[in-house]
Every structure is written in C-alpha cells, then in structure tokens.
Image (spheres, rainbow, N blue to C red):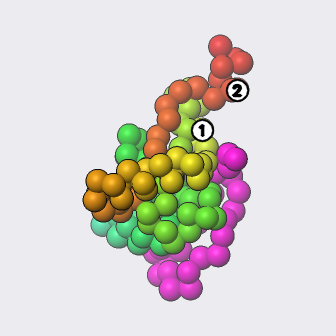
Amino acid sequence: MAHSHEAHHHERPRDLTRNQELVLTTLNNADAPLSAYDILDRLRDEGLRAPLQVYRALEKLIEHGLAHRLESLNAFVCCADANCHGRASGTAAFAICSGCGRVDEFADPEVTARLAAWAGETGFGLERTTIELRGRCAECRKAA
C-alpha cells in the first residue's frame, strides 16, 4: 500500500527538542524530499542558522523512525509508514519519480522478511534498510 507524503503522521515522541519539532514539521509540510539546506532555508526565521543544528535534528528523527534519508537524492522525507515507527531495522521503500520528483513510501513485509532472513543467515547486523526505486510515476507516464 502506497502512501503519499502529504498526510500528517503518527504520534511524535514526547522528548523531541524544539529543533527536532521544527525540522519534522518542515518535512511534514513539504511535498517533496528536502535537503538539509532546504530545511535550513525554511527555518531561518525560526532562528536556525547552522547546518549542524539541522543535521543533528535529522539524525534524531531518523533514529526515532520519524524521518528517512534518501541516499540517492541526499534529501530527507518524513516517514509515512506507522509500522516503521521507532524501528530502525524496518525496511523503508521509496518510489522516486524522475519526472515530477514525487516520492511514495511503501512497506512490503515479504521484502522485509527476505532481507532480515539473509542478514540472519550471513550474520550481517542490519541497522537500517532503505530501498529506492527510480522511475516515472503514472501521472508523468500519462503526460509523456
């Protein structure tokens, strides 16, 4: 089941700092992945000036399972999958449209199970799994 990143999601841990709240809200309100500098630009008026403040906040949000880093874009999105919440070892899969930049997050328990089984067999200590699918969304393919 695919989720678009427009929905507002789950309970936030009560111990988020002001910076973490600001960064999470910024990601929540964005309609596309944001780089740390995009986030910084949007939060300048809130008093965030240093990229390090944003990176620290992002690190914590990722640890809490509230955000994900898309490696290929070097950008961040808030987590749309409630099941992934707080479980760093959960598998997050993202379909990234190269046309409009839309990102859909989906979870596939079978894929997660297969990867966990492989990790178990090989003794690989899985910390987090992010799968990125690149292509064109249905809308962009229709328009082509």
Res 139 label: 2
Q: Which residues are magenta?
A: 1-29
Say whether residue 102 is left or right of residue 59. right
Q: Residues within 10 Å of mark 2 (few under 14, many from 20)?
A: few
Q: Tell me which residue sits at (62%, 57%) in the image.
A: 80
Looking at the image, the residue that sits furthest to the top is 144
Q: Tell me which residue sits at (50%, 35%) in the image.
A: 133
Q: Residues within 10 Å of mark 1 (few under 14, many from 20)?
A: some
Residue type for callout 2: Glu
Percent across and percent down for residue 130 are 44, 50
| Magenta span includes 85 | no
| Quadrant of res 78 | bottom right
Whether residues under marks 2 and 1 lie with C-beta atoms below 8 angstroms apart, the answer is yes
Q: Tell me which residue sits at (51%, 72%) in the image.
A: 86
Element type where label 1 sits in the image: loop
**First in sequence: mark 2 vs mark 1:** 1
Res 102 label: 1
Element type where label 2 sits in the image: helix
Q: CA distance from mark 2 to mark 1?
A: 10 Å
